[in-house]
Amino acid sequence: MWCEQCRQPVEDEELTEAGACPECGTVLREERRPVPWHFKLMIVATVIYLVWRAYQGIGWLVHHV
Ligand SMILES: [Zn+2]
């Protein structure tokens, strides 16, 4: 790992629990989260929107055919 703030290399073992530089606290190693929660939320919102639009489309067809 290379710390830009301290301009010196930081060993993996020296990193804090959060993956930050022990000298300045800059996070050098991001937590490995599989999928961010807001990304999941966005997908759920998109699916709900599409289902709603499909529902509206079917309703329109039923009333106009
Ligand atoms: Zn540092």
Image: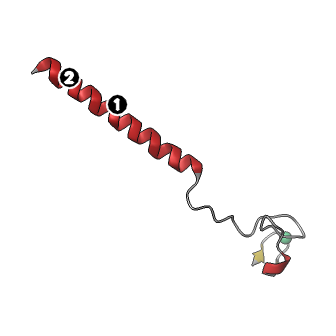
- Element carrying mark 2: helix
**x then y, percent, for residue 45:** 46, 39
Task: Tell me if residue 9 can be seen.
Answer: no
Quarter of the figure with the C terminus: top left
Determine which quarter of the picture holds residue 24: bottom right
- Element carrying mark 1: helix
Q: Is residue 55 above or below residue 21?
A: above
**x then y, percent, for residue 19:** 77, 68
Residue wearing tag 2:
60
Residue furthest out toward the top: 63
**x then y, percent, for residue 6:** 85, 73
Residue wearing tag 1:
52
For the point 13% across and 19% down, which residue is it? Answer: 64
Q: Is residue 43 left or right of residue 53?
A: right
Determine which quarter of the picture holds residue 26: bottom right
Residue 17 tag number:
none
For the point 20% across and 22% down, which residue is it? Answer: 60
Q: Amino acid at mark 2?
A: Trp
The image quadrant in which ligand 1 is located: bottom right
Residue furthest out toward the left: 65
Camera-side residue of 15 and 7: 15
Q: Amino acid at mark 1?
A: Trp
